[in-house]
Image (tube, grey):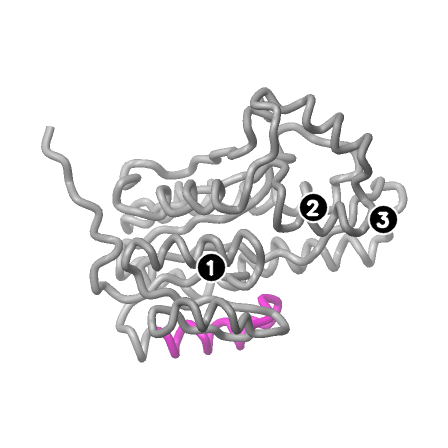
Amino acid sequence: MTHRPDKSGESRGIALVTGGSGGIGSAVVRRLVADGQKVAFTYRNNAPSELLTDLGEQVEAHQLTLSDLVAAEKLIGGLLDRHGSIHTLIHAAGPHVPMVHLSHVTPDQFAEQVNADLVGFFNIVHAALPALRSSTGSIVAVTSAATSRYPKRDGLSAIPKGGVEAMVRALAVEEGRYGVRANCVGPGMLNDGMAARLIAAGDLDERSLAITSSNIPLGRFGTSHDIAEAVAFLASDRADFISGQNLNVDGGYSV
């Protein structure tokens, strides 16, 4: 069998990463740039100056609220004007989600989270899909291993992300005729990113962390780098016969 080299780092347009200023998102941006790709990424509030300084001309940052469909469409149009094509869409955006029992979540809070996670993902896909069809591109959504093995008090995060995973499967089925692939990566417990924020906020105490660690066969937490490696693989030509899949990167937690 002849090995086909990965062409994702060649001059074929640009990759777009939503939430590129977050822990996982920034690790993904760095990993794609290491593969030789040009990357545009979005942020919600503060532009990540360190990332821009470190990566220079290989990246560009754009402020975007994903619930704003008009802004999403404008971003996609601008990228196409400047770079010709978009070959990869990686959805790594996600606000901080407190760990709380569903009985303590108000309908307004739930609707806000669904709008941020699920509707926001739909908006950027809707805007980018014509470009991805033209480039026979790839979609990777960062979700959560909690959709496979539910931890208590994680419904506000896991339920909308379960919807994202369902949408990714639908995209894989419907868009495969255009050569578009769609997959998910489900992070488990990490030492950085959102997990670090949950620990800092007191949502996860030492007892909770010990229980969580005991439920991971590898007996340790992962890092954003672990997630970025999986995302970069699924987005690349090395995975060009993989679509509609959900890869949990969780040390075996979801087994």
Three-letter code for the amino acid on which mark 1 is drawn: Val
Residues marked 1 and 2 touching at CB (< 8 Å): no
Q: Position of residue 225 (x, y in %)?
A: 48, 45
**Callout 1 crowding tier (Cα within 10 Å): few <14, some 14–19, many ≥20:** many
**Sooner in the amino-acid sequence: mark 1 or mark 2:** 1
Q: Which residue is mark 1?
A: 125
Q: Position of residue 89 (x, y in %)?
A: 41, 57
Name the outermost residue toward the left.
2
Please give the range of residues in magenta: 64-79
> How far, Cα to Cα, is label 1 from label 2?
20 Å
Quarter of the figure with the N terminus: top left
Three-letter code for the amino acid on which mark 3 is drawn: Val
Q: Is residue 163 above or below residue 38?
A: above
Q: Is residue 15 above or below residue 101?
A: below
Which residue is rendered at x = 31% and y = 79% of the image? 81
**Sooner in the amino-acid sequence: mark 2 or mark 3:** 3
Question: In the shown orientation, is residue 26 left or right of residue 172?
Answer: right
**Sooner in the amino-acid sequence: mark 1 or mark 3:** 3
> Tag count in the figure?
3
